[in-house]
Structures are given as C-alpha cells and as structure tokens.
Image: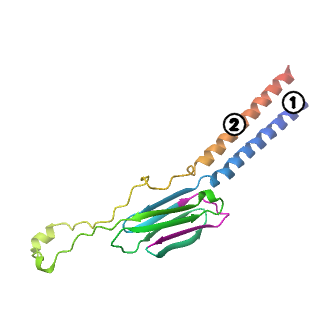
Amino acid sequence: MTAIRHRWHRAAAVATGTAALVGTGMFVASPASAHVPGWEVDCYTTSVHLENYSDRAENTIKITAGGKTLVDETFGRTFDKKVNLPEHSSPLDVHLVIDAGDDDKFDRDEHKTSPVCEESPSPTPSESSPEPSPSESSSEAPAPSEKPSTAPNGGGDDLAETGASSATPMIAGAAGVVLAAGAGLVVVSRKRRSAQD
C-alpha cells in the first residue's frame, strides 16, 4: 500500500509540474506574439492605439506631418494617443514609425494621407438673414454642431492585427493545465489498477 501511495504522490507531482510548465510557456510566449497596432487618420486628427508590446524593452513611436513632429515618445506595454493635425489646404502626408524593442518584425514604417476637411461656406455680409422674432427663436431647437467623422475600425488601410486578444493566453494556459492534470490522473489510475491486480 505504501508503494502505491508513493506512486500516487510522484504521478501527482509530475502532472502538476507539467501543467505549470505548459501554462508558464503559454503566458510567456503570448505577449511577444500578440502586438496589436491600430492607427487612424482623418482630416483633423490622427490616433494611435497599441497593445501587448513588451514592457521589458524600450519601444518608440514617432509621427510626423507637414514637416512637424507631432509625437516622439517611448512607451511600454500600451500606447494610446490622439493628436491634432496641422491645418492643410491640400492632402497631407502623415508618417508613422514604430520601433518595437523586443523584435524588428513588429516595427512599422507607414504613410497615410489626411484629406482636406470640407468646411461649410460662411454667408457673405450682404446675404445676412433676417433676425427671427422672439416667438420663432424660442420654439426652435438649436442645430447640433457637426463633428468630423472618423473612419470605422477595420478599414481597408488599417494595420493588420498580429496577435490575439488579451483573454487568449489565460484560456490557453487554463486548457494546458486541465490537459496535463487529466493525463496525470490517467497514469495514476492505470498504475493503481496494475498494482491491485
């Protein structure tokens, strides 16, 4: 009976160690392969959203437009920023450079064009409209202000996602632990049967 108990403890230790190694390997490997870059440009602004970069290495980002440097920073695991573009009367070239500190394959060097904003023409002084009477002005609701439209996520020229969501490593790690524990229990049950026979 003591030999069976020793085998049981040894098999449980092996299963636990295997599960720990599998889970650790998945959690360590996944952030390096899950860089998620996102970059959008409209006629007024440019916005950048970066996830799952290495916080153990120095990552840098630089954005220039119209001869001006808009962003020149280092960042860690994530970066999220929206900046105004210079005023422009013709299409404006916007240049993004990302240098990932952990691997050159995650670097980005891309250009996008900011279109000219369509402004509504203001009326000339000779075409001024008559003042509304107090009864008319009180009954009319103010017109909503127009805001610039932004391109939806997943547009044709957005950067491709190179990894998985932040929940994927946890799910994969848990699956590995369950699989290893199950294998350990199968081995233990077979040894117990053979010992009893």
- Residue found at the very far bottom of the displayed protein: 125
The amino acid type of the residue labelled 1 equals Ile
**Which numbered dot is residue 179?**
2
Write down the quadrant of residue 131 in the picture. Answer: bottom left
The stretch in magenta equals 50-65
**Which numbered dot is residue 4?**
1
- Which corner quadrant holds the N terminus? top right
- Above or below — where is 100 with respect to 134? above
Identify the image's colour scheme: rainbow, by chain, secondary structure or one colour: rainbow
Task: Identify the secondary structure beneath mark 1.
Answer: helix
Q: Residues within 10 Å of mark 2 (few under 14, many from 20)?
A: some
Q: Position of residue 103 (x, y in %)?
A: 65, 59
Q: At x 43% / y 74%, what residue is drawn?
A: 66
In the figure, is residue 119 to the left or right of 77?
left
Q: At x 42% / y 52%, what residue is drawn?
A: 156
- Above or below — where is 102 with respect to 70? above
**Could you say which is closer to the camera, residue 77 or residue 68?**
68
Q: Position of residue 53 (x, y in %)?
A: 60, 59
Could you give the CA–CA distance between mark 2 and mark 1, rounded to whole angstroms? 23 Å
Q: Is residue 52 magenta?
A: yes
The amino acid type of the residue labelled 2 equals Leu
Q: Position of residue 188 (x, y in %)?
A: 80, 30
Indicate which disc, 2 or 1, sits on the residue closer to the N terminus.
Answer: 1
Q: Residues within 10 Å of mark 1 (few under 14, many from 20)?
A: some
